[in-house]
Amino acid sequence: MSQTSRPPAATAADQAGATVLAVIPARGGSKGVPGKNLAPIGGVPLVARAVRACVRSRRVSAVVVSTDDPSIAEVARTAGAEVVLRPVAIAGDTATSEAAVLHAMDAHETTAGAATDVVLLVQCTSPFITAEEIDGVVAAVLDGGADTAHTVAPFHGFLWREAAEDLADDFAEGDSAYGVNHDKATRPRRQDRPQDLLETGAAYAMRAAGFRAAGHRFFGRTALVRTDPAKVLEIDEPADLQRARTLAPLLDPTAATPTRDDVDAVVLDFDGTQTDDRVLIDSDGHEAVTVHRGDGLGIAALRRAGLPVLILSTETNPVVAARARKLDVPVLHGIDRKDLALKQWCEENGIAPERVLYAGNDVNDLPCFGLVGWPVAVAGAHDVVRAAARAITTVEGGHGAIREIAAWLLGPTLAR
């Protein structure tokens, strides 16, 4: 049942630095949304978003991702988590989250040589989970005296259910639906109804010993930790993924633009990013494009600040090479697989891809978005590209978008 009485004072053990382990289950298989746990929201894979929230938590001692997928494991480690490889027996569609948490807790305790006081189940299918929510469920257990706690959001809707055929005789002729949380003959005002709370599925905290004994996440005294209903979204279907990508610029706690401390190199697409995506062709077939002088100033400022800059384009066009010469920056153009070229360039220059800002505007930029830590879309970019970006400029390509990015990194005066 939910917590209704005054919680007891925290025990001495609780107050003396309890060990809190966050476990994030992340299987490789997903029928509803293939590759779901690696799907980027705001430019960051779902599993990495969950890891980052746990790492930012003030009360989590260690973060473990339980997975059967090597790609998920690599992303999780990069984001700051330990990885426990899940055996086949608990990696199928019918495996429970509890089984994964128990296995991961056992593995972590064996490696760490210490017992866990509180274990968390954190779902990476909740893309907008925050460190504050995680701290909230931990506090409900350690400070509030609960055995278990989970996130909930206020819910005001009227729930309906269609009756099973064998119950049809209990309803009026032709009627087969009934109210779950209300009498359909009475429509009370919201303020006159009991407050319903929706389980968000984002974060659960449990006393480790009680969890081992019960084998499930709702034993003993349960505390409900309220969260912002505007951020409640679980990724179960492709439409959920699209909704999350649309909402990310508004709800993402990491949606702030990058600073110089976040980035070691800047890689720029050309057409539609440094130009307005239009091409002028004369009678001899010569092409010309329009660029923005402010972008040139921004790129020069980035170079003076010691940031490597690269132009990367699929087009084989003298205009691209000419612009690169004018800016005195290296260029790779006529590239079919921009992501492979970018990865090789990073390796040759000793730059970690997660420290790269890549600016683009169209679908051929998406593979590079999946490689770098700061995928940036210019305003006016393709909708799919905007959805996959971690940040979006306010001005369009060819109208000063690169200068805007330089201002993010170096300050509005483009420090000399």
Image (spheres, rainbow, N blue to C red):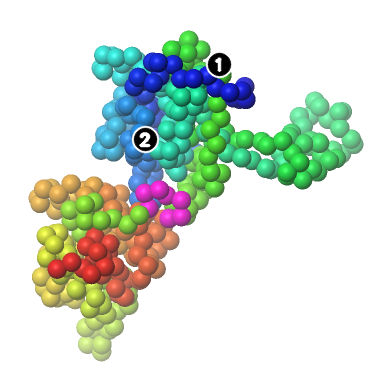
Which residue is the site of mark 2? 57
The amino acid on which the numbered mark 1 sits, given as a three-letter code, is Gly
Coordinates of residue 281 in the picture (x, y in percent)? 27, 84
Based on the displayed image, in which of its 4 quarters is residue 61 positioned? top left
Coordinates of residue 332 in the picture (x, y in percent)? 16, 62
> Which one is nearer the viewer's eye here, 85 or 50?
50
Density class for disc 1 (Cα within 10 Å; few <14, some 14-19, many ≥20) is some
Q: Is residue 40 visible?
A: yes
Instruction: Please give the name of the residue rendered at 44% of the width and 27% of the height, measured from the top-left corner.
Output: 138
Asked if labels 1 and 2 touch by Cβ distance under 8 angstroms, the answer is no
Looking at the image, which residue sits at the far top? 213
Q: Is residue 404 magenta?
A: no
- Pointer 2 or 1: first along the chain: 2
Which residue is the site of mark 1? 220
Coordinates of residue 364 in the picture (x, y in percent)? 31, 59
> Which one is nearer the viewer's eye here, 171 or 153?
153
Coordinates of residue 265 in the picture (x, y in percent)? 18, 56
| Image quarter hosting the N terminus | top right
The amino acid on which the numbered mark 2 sits, given as a three-letter code, is Ser
Q: Which residues are magenta?
A: 249-255
Based on the displayed image, in which of its 4 quarters is residue 174 positioned? top right
Instruction: Please give the name of the residue rendered at 48% of the width and 53% of the height, measured from the top-left corner.
Output: 247
Kind of element beneath mark 1: loop
Residue 402's place in the image compared with 205, above or below, is below
For residue 109, side relative to residue 175 (left or right): left
Kind of element beneath mark 2: loop
Residue 368's place in the image compared with 1, above or below, is below
